Amino acid sequence: MPARELRAARRSLRAVVLAVLLPLPALAPAPALAQAPGAAPPAPASPLLKVVDPAFVDTTVKACTDFFGYANGAWLAHDTIPAAYSSSGVMRDMGDANELVVRSVLDDAVAQRAAQPEGSTPRKLGTFYASCMDSAAIEAVGFDPIRPWLAGIDSIRTRARLVPEIAALQVRGADVAFGYSPSPDLHDAGRYMAWLFQGGLGLPDRDYYTDAGPSADSTRRQYVEHITRMFTLAGETAAGAAQDARLVMALETELAKASLTRVALRDPSATDHAMSVASLAALARAVSWPRYFRAIGVTVPVARVNVAEPKFMRRVSALLQTASLAQWRAYLRYHVLSQAAPWLSSPFVQEDFAFNSRFTGAKQLLPRWKRCLRETDGDLGEALGQAYVAKTFPPEARARAKAVIDDIRAAFAERLRHLSWMSDTTRARALDKLARMGEKVGYPDHWRDYSRLVAAEGPFVLNVARANAFEWQRVANRPGSPVDTTEWGITVPTVNAYYDGTKNEMVFPAGALVPQTFDPKADDGANYGSLGGSWAGHELTHGFDDEGRHFDAAGNLRDWWTPADSTHFTEQAERVVRQFDGYIQVDTFHVNGKLTEGENIADFGGVLTGYDALERALARDGRPGPIDGYTPEQRFFLGYAQSYRVNNRLERLRTRVKVDPHSPERWRVNGPLSNTPAFAQAFGCRPGDPMVRSQDSIPHIW
Ligand SMILES: [Zn+2]
């Protein structure tokens, strides 16, 4: 999981409670395409992915011993992770297919851009991508395009200049000092309010700064060396660069120590601190807040602010007053360089990759077109989404996917009605929350308006900064206005899905609704295991996991549980935590049961609900005979397990144990299935088999 992708994810998915299905943006391999930009679009490759592929099954592994190994072992045995990737498997395969389609859209946009009207969105799309692909121009100018930004930082000679400069950098997309984002009011979820967040770190997690031990020491040492090299590339002397790098590390360490851990952030009440601007001023005195809001382009009145992490903001304020200006200048300079590096000349790109790949294990850079495509999708995704949908997602596929999701909703409602542990009071509220849960399938009904985005011929790094500024201006003045319920948090070609607690909705983009996740022509067993269980049932259950359950039907943070039901839930969820704490993630590191609690609950709920939905569908539509020798129920569990067909590099697993709320794929399969009696029944497993956990340790939640 590259730090860069994590930072991008933070920027685009900063909703308060937003649980994504998969840990990473799709990592796709480079297909062998001899396709010049501007030529006719390539036909999308046919990856021939199946929802259930019997060729992946390793029959030498016993299903009742290790179902992940059984379902995926034959594939794993022959898989080699390509050099530019940190993992391979289903996400990479699906992402690969999607990226070929997106590339054909972008190549068309490049070829036709001169013929498009000035200022039109198709012209901007072509101009944006073409400026990224123009590597000769990028090499020729080195870091010249960002010299004015560095000069701006160097001109900070008084403390009064510090916050305005931080504000200007934030608008261009830099994650410095702290974050600002309008997000739904936790207690009036239909309205946005201003939020301030912790942020400003260069390493993927606060723990990298505070962990003890030789491995952590080595990471920190290499980080300082990396910062030094970046400064040297930007023209500092070796001695000056080394000195400045130590200053950056020291400041970031102070920010890290004041930051909440990812586990602490899972509790929504931990970030619920709405206050008046006067109280904010008392908390963080170093900032003139009205002036700050003006500097970031906020023109609406801001009366109240949710300070997600007050301790952090207090510390930032103190550092703004006490850390030397030289230290702040070095810190801001590094963050500007680090953010721009992927889009500067090769020495910067290589240095950025050399350091950040230690968190992924990737051995070489992705091809340029893939890097450019992903950035373009991130910044102008809804400008290419329509063309993507036209090429990949016929109305029948949308209708069929919606039908599976409808069955999942009905199956979960049925489970709620029959939960023996739940009081009727809580049950009625849970059913209401489910009934009012929104869903978005395929693509937005309203596409984003890019008329105010500027894309110009010339250095790509400036187009990225303009796109960041466009995005900032698009949302900055939201405080006080109604929440945009039509907005999507991820783009249409993305291989992922999410549940948003403050909107109480689940979202499935078209990019995820293709084989291997889902095939309208596949059998119910396969589709209900994969789309039904591991996608729709999973996202739905997020509305009722340890985090989502604190939000009501309207998305407000409100306790709608009776005390007894709350106690039961917490006790049973603790079983999930203990179960996953017991699994090894990588080396001698165990899975962090607390960090992964919500995802593991969602996985388990997804399996149970998907299975119920399959049984309902079979009863309604008739039961087919075995396919490839498997019953519908066996294909359900294979569909579920093969949807987690992933081969990870060790470096990626080591990073994920710290930063990823998802367990490794092996445990996302074996964990919930070993709690599921229907699984044991389908494969004839017996008590005592590793895939059959004892009744008194199985969690009874959903
Ligand atoms: Zn999830």
Image: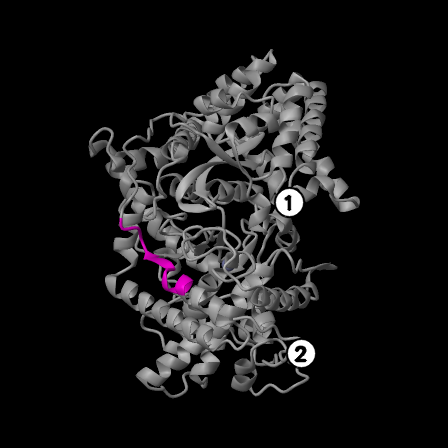
Image point 65% across, 60% down: which residue? 593
Residue 454 image position (x, y, % from top left)? 33, 28
Q: Amino acid at mark 1?
A: Arg
Q: Nearer the viewer, residue 572 or 278?
A: 278
Q: Which mark is residue 592?
A: none
The answer to the question of whether label 2 and label 1 lie on touching residues, with beta carbons closer than 8 A, is no
Circle 1 sits in a helix, a strand or a loop, which is it?
Answer: helix
Image point 48% across, 64% down: which residue? 541
Image coloring type: one colour
Taking 669 as reference, is 192 left or right?
Answer: left
Q: Nearer the viewer, residue 515 or 350?
A: 515
Against 477, residue 20 (above or below) is below
Name the residue tied to disc 2. 696
Name the residue tied to disc 1. 358
Q: How many marks?
A: 2
Label 2, residues with CA under 10 Å away: few <14, some 14-19, many ≥20: few
Residue 99 image position (x, y, % from top left)? 39, 51
Q: Nearer the viewer, residue 204 or 102?
A: 204
Query: What segment is highlighted magenta in the picture?
Result: 432-445
Label 1, residues with CA under 10 Å away: few <14, some 14-19, many ≥20: some
Which tag is nearer the camera, tag 2 or tag 1? 2
Image point 55% across, 15% down: which residue? 161
Q: Kindly indicate the quadrant of the structure image that contains residue 666.
A: bottom right
Could you tell me if residue 63 is visible in this image?
A: yes
Q: Is mark 1 within 8 Å of ligand 1?
A: no
